[in-house]
Amino acid sequence: MVEEKKKRGHWKSKLGFILAAAGSAVGLGNIWKFPYITGENGGGYFVLIYLACILIVGIPIMMAEIMIGRASKKQPVGAFEELQGEKTGWTFVGWMGVACGFIILSFYIVVAGWAMDYTLKAVVNFSNPIAEKAETAAKVYRVKTSVADMRKTLVERRIKLESAESISVVRGKASKKVWSEYKNYTKAIESGVALKEARKVLFEDEKFKRKIELAIKLEKNISEIKRKARVEAIEFYEKIDDKKIRDESETLFRRQKIAVGIDKAFGSLVTDGWTSSFWAFAFMLLTILVVAGGVSGGIEKVCTVLMPTLVGIMIFMVCYGVFQPGFKSAITFVFYPDISKLKASGVLEALGHAFFTLSLGMGAMLTYGSYQEDKKGLLSQSIWIALLDTGIAILACMMIFPIIFSYGMSPSAGPGLVFKSMPLAFTEIGSGGMLLGIIFFSLLVLAALTSAISLLEVVASYFIDVKNWSRVRAAWIIGGAVFLFALPSAFSYDPDFIMASWTPTFGMNFFDTMDYLSSNWLLPFGGLFIAIYAGWVMPAKLRDAEFEGSSKMVLTIWLMLIRFVAPILVTLVILQKVGILQLN
Ligand code: TRP
């Protein structure tokens, strides 16, 4: 019996494709990760470099993926075979993509699940009791503490805040390795044998000696920075009258109490594998339902509704931010270029993130491209997708940082920025904050959903196209398998995790291992191979046909970028990520 070939899904409209692809690109990477790495890298130049990476590496590789998909009309595994006319080593790149989609999705749904948990938390106003308790405690603190002690506390805090940046710049002058060796050295010396003797033995290694001397010199600079900050802070608070000191101390005390409460809430969520799994399950279910609905009936439909909603909600949040006292500092922080805050490793981080945020390197854009019917608009589509993605990442900064700065929190809080600092700010805002919290976290869930769809689609499309499974079957079975594989990630922070030996064996927990594997290895290598394939291997006739309607110059520039610039830069990222290159 000859099986009749099922008709392949396709997009109803160009706009539908762009919104679906942008939906894939816009996700946790934009709203959760971009703001915090911008914070950690000091904003300004980091943002500029990130934009440059999107332009000279991101867009060309996105074009490469879309064109491989369009030309082959296949999912990643079949695409290379179709274009080459036979099975070659390139097919492996497709396999890598499918595996990578599976892996990314497995930890992505855990984080997305946390966002769902937080949406419910916001709805039930979970921080209210925490805030009430904190307020009472702060009032007691106010009457029980002497002004002198309050001043002392404020001074210490100001020293930390004011010197943190300069200290991190000084620290950045030596590599992580130097600092860890220095730490080992001081420990060894302290615990140590006759001091001089020990030093002598250790310093016989010239290289080691130089490293330690560098660290000691930098340590001196740091003490000097701290000393200056202390003088400044004492002077600053001497001029302030007692009433203001009391007010400021009370606020600070209250915020610290709330922060502790929220920290605990986040901690009890992530250390509770069952709850994390429950939410991952709920989120996976949503994703499956959309993918089972088909390309135009599920993915396109959902994305054309969700993407404009998402942008609308974000603009609302940014408008709220504009009227906050911290708006100006937020803008300065994000856009004002300060060269002293830029580290070489930040440049590579920007490039690595450009990959993740545009959903490149594993065939997601390739698969979405393969559902396109005609060949026009390769460049303009890629630019639109990148523009939407970048615009939303910047909007995310402009909605998060004004609130962060207005409520005296640190922009460099790291991964906890969204799950800890934002709820704290919402709590301090009061009753309106509850509404903002609901809006903010549902936004996060929606953004994650349109990305998760694309990840599941890549894996499912293989089984649909090659194994001839029905779409519904593929979505449910693959989705179910991803959920099972997500369990160890959901339990990664749980003290009762049955795979407790994972962390000591691999040096990081299961969740981080999956993240590391995909972000540091699979995606960059996938991107590198895709660039090489599109630039050097893909039959020129097929390639040029994809540029229908664009000028010769576009093709020439793209070829230069995809053949030389992208592979070289991506190789640098790989070398840095796996630790061969140690830039700082
Ligand atoms: N781009 C999404 C984000 O920023 C994540 C994502 C979806 C992704 N599909 C991908 C990342 C494919 C890499 C590859 O959150």
Image (tube, grey):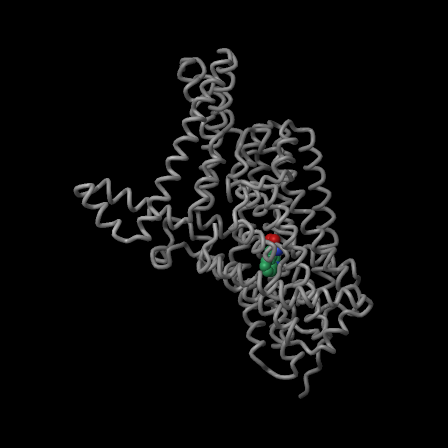
- The reply to whether residue 302 is in sight is no
Q: Nearer the viewer, residue 74 or 292?
A: 74
In the image, residue 500 lies at what x, y percent? 35, 55
Q: Is residue 19 above or below residue 326?
A: below
In the image, residue 523 lies at what x, y percent? 55, 62
Q: How many marks?
A: 0
Q: Residue at x 51, y 44 (%)?
A: 415
Q: Is residue 408 above or below residue 580?
A: above
Q: Residue at x 57, y 32 (%)?
A: 425
- The reply to whether residue 14 is in sight is yes
- Drawn side of residue 546 relative to residue 497, left or right: right
In the image, residue 468 lies at what x, y percent? 63, 76
Q: Is residue 162 above or below residue 368?
A: above
Residue 18 placement: quadrant: bottom right
Q: Quadrant of the N terminus?
A: bottom right
Residue 399 placement: quadrant: top right
Residue 441 placement: quadrant: top right
Q: Nearer the viewer, residue 118 or 57?
A: 57
Q: Is residue 516 above or below residue 551?
A: above
Q: Looking at this view, name the residue that lies furthest to the bottom.
A: 1
Ligand 1 quarter of the rendering: bottom right
Q: Nearer the viewer, residue 377 or 109?
A: 377
- Drawn side of residue 422 relative to residue 578, left or right: right
In the image, residue 290 lies at what x, y percent? 66, 59
Q: Looking at this view, name the residue that lies furthest to the left.
A: 194
